[in-house]
Amino acid sequence: MRITDREFWTLVHGMGFGAAYLLAFAGGLAGLYSLRPELVTTEGITERVRRLRWGIILMVVLVWLTVLVGTYVVYPWYRQTPPPSIDTKTQSEALKAYPRYWLLASEETAEFHDFGMEFKEHVAWISPLLATVVGYAVLRYGKELANNRRARSMVMILFFLSFAIAGIAGVLGALITKAAPLT
Amino acid sequence: MTAQTTQAKSQAQIGADIKSGEGAEVSILDREVGAAFIASGIGSFVLGLLVVLTEMKAGKGLSAALNWVGPVGPLSGKTGVAVIAFVVGWVVLHFAFKNRAVTLTTAFVITLILVGLGVLMSFPPFFELFAK
């Protein structure tokens, strides 16, 4: 079993950092949801807030790494221009090394780029912005989140939005990779 | 001690509240977090706006100017400007809200609107309307 550098970094971006962020979301949301004085003792809140702080920091780092690796490592390979000797209007074996052009060479696959990548490459960057302010809110409010139901609800909503956007980008990325894998 | 008393006591310990434009008391924590919320909305909105502007025929110059990293193309500049807007917006609002702030609820609603617009403007069927 051998993988190329491009396949490795695509895995790191999607199945590494991205998937880890999406999986960790469930724990983060559960941690926020259960931060209630009627459910947990004072000592329990202290323990959970400490865990939540570290967990949120880790998730913020993961989502930023996801978009940075995706944009600055994987994306350039995806959008690389083929040499003039390769016909960009036909899905040939030679064109497969240039995923963006390979997808656009056929009406059947063009939407993977025109919709899939064009949406994913931009909207994904909103996820770390939201995750960062969620992390800030958790760090600043700390134990007060347990008593401040309104703030806690807002934090959970923004956290969910960050997850949903990352999820959409992840699904589109998986579909694009299936249609035109980076090798 | 009830949850409400605890909350009131912690707010008093943190510092003096200020009144928002709506006349409601806004704690220091709510001001700071509200500023952060809106900053994320600003970054999202700026990203979406740049996507629309670069899709327009008149946006070719802007697209070229946003080509900060060659292999990445204009995406590098669009996201770079969005992140800068996020950071600058956060700093500006953080200090601006020291003297006058909106309630956390208002900040949250503003954030949702800006993020919603950012997502909408990043949506290909929407921004392609401007390309045509």
Image: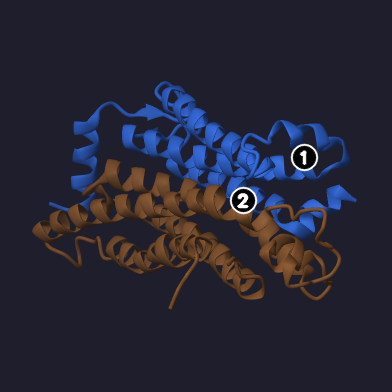
Disc 2/disc 1 C-alpha distance (Å): 22 Å
Left of B57 or right of it: where is A124? left
Eyeballing the image, is A163 above or below B69?
A: below
Left of A40 or right of it: where is A58? right
- Spot occupied by residue A30 in the image (x, y as percentages of width and height): 31, 67
Left of A158 or right of it: where is B74? right
Which residue occupies 50% across, 52% down? A67
Which residue occupies 19% across, 32% down? B13
The crowding category of the residue bearing disc 1, from other C-alpha atoms within 10 Å (few below 14, some 14 to 19, many at least 20), is some
- Tag shown at residue B23: none
Eyeballing the image, is A58 above or below B68?
A: below
Q: Colour of chain B?
A: blue
Q: Which residue is mark 1?
A: B53
Q: Nearer the viewer, residue A147 or B56?
A: B56
- Tag shown at residue A76: 2
Left of B69 or right of it: where is A48? left
Quadrant containing the N terminus of chain A is: bottom left
Instruction: Give amino acid for label 2.
Output: Pro
Q: Is residue B113 visible?
A: yes
Callout 2 secondary element? helix
Which residue occupies 63% across, 42% down? B47
Which residue occupies 9% across, 58% down? A43
Instruction: Give amino acid for label 1.
Output: Leu
The quarter of the displayed image where residue A40 is located: bottom left
Q: Do badges 2 and 1 share one subunit?
A: no
Callout 1 secondary element? helix
Q: Nearer the viewer, residue A9 or A126?
A: A9
Quadrant containing the C terminus of chain A is: bottom right
**Badge 1: chain ID:** B
Q: Colour of chain A?
A: brown
The quarter of the displayed image where residue B120 is located: bottom right
- Spot occupied by residue B114 in the image (x, y as percentages of width and height): 61, 45
